[in-house]
Amino acid sequence: MKPDDYQKALDAAHEEIQEILQQKFVLDDRLSQLKKTVDALSSLVQEFPPVAQLYGAVAEGLPVGGISNAIRRILTESKSPMTPTQIKTALSARGFDMSEYANAAAVIHNTLKRLERQKELTVVQSPSGNIAYAIYRSLTPLDADSGPKQK
């Protein structure tokens, strides 16, 4: 193969990843809606446990370290792209202390943009226009004390 062929193959792979992630975002959004419906209807008919337990949504602890590591971990463990609001909710649910930040949402957005610039995340836009983020490449395990290795 010629170098141009490699570039074309790489571009095609990038494009296919974007298409698949967008499809996954739509499916995950629908799944989320259905889980809420099941949860609400379960309450009405007195059927328990809640949907979160039925589908294995168990929150695990976050690594010691900063918000970048916490966001990386959440997105690495997520099976679908997440919006900044979903990431903030996941951070809170896992006990990440955001009280040190005057504007946690801004910190999360800035961190996501930086991780995107560093090619650690990819951005997906849903048909409704919502922006979501997903881990783009496999990350090496993080050392909670020292953070990610610098190049």
Image: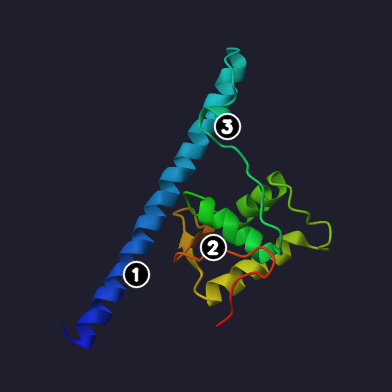
- CA distance for labels 3 and 1: 33 Å
Q: Where is residue 74 drawn, in percent x and y?
A: 59, 54
Left or right: residue 22 compared with residue 100: left
Relative vertical location of residue 41 with respect to residue 12 in this rendering, above or below: above
Q: Earlier in the sequence, mark 1 or mark 2?
A: 1
Relative vertical location of residue 119 with respect to residue 102 in this rendering, above or below: below
Amino acid carrying mark 1 in the image = His
Amino acid carrying mark 3 in the image = Ala
- CA distance for labels 1 and 2: 24 Å
Q: Residues within 10 Å of mark 1 (few under 14, many from 20)?
A: few
Tell me the quarter of the image containing the C terminus: bottom right
* Foreground label between 2 and 3: 2
Element on which disc 2 rests: loop
Tell me, for residue 52, which label it has, or none: 3
Amino acid carrying mark 2 in the image = Pro
Tell me, for residue 141, which label it has, or none: 2
Q: Residues within 10 Å of mark 2 (few under 14, many from 20)?
A: few
Specify the farthest residue to the left: 1
Labels 1 & 2 near each other (Cβ < 8 A): no
Asked where in the image residue 20 lies, by quadrant, the reply is: bottom left
Q: Earlier in the sequence, mark 2 or mark 3?
A: 3
Element on which disc 3 rests: helix
Q: Where is residue 117 drawn, in percent x and y?
A: 54, 77
Observer-nearest residue: 131 or 20?
Answer: 20
**Who's the residue at 29% across and 75% down the image?**
10
Residue at image mark 1: 14
Left or right: residue 15 compared with residue 41: left
Q: Where is residue 131 drawn, in percent x and y?
A: 53, 60
Q: Where is residue 24 drawn, in percent x and y?
A: 40, 50
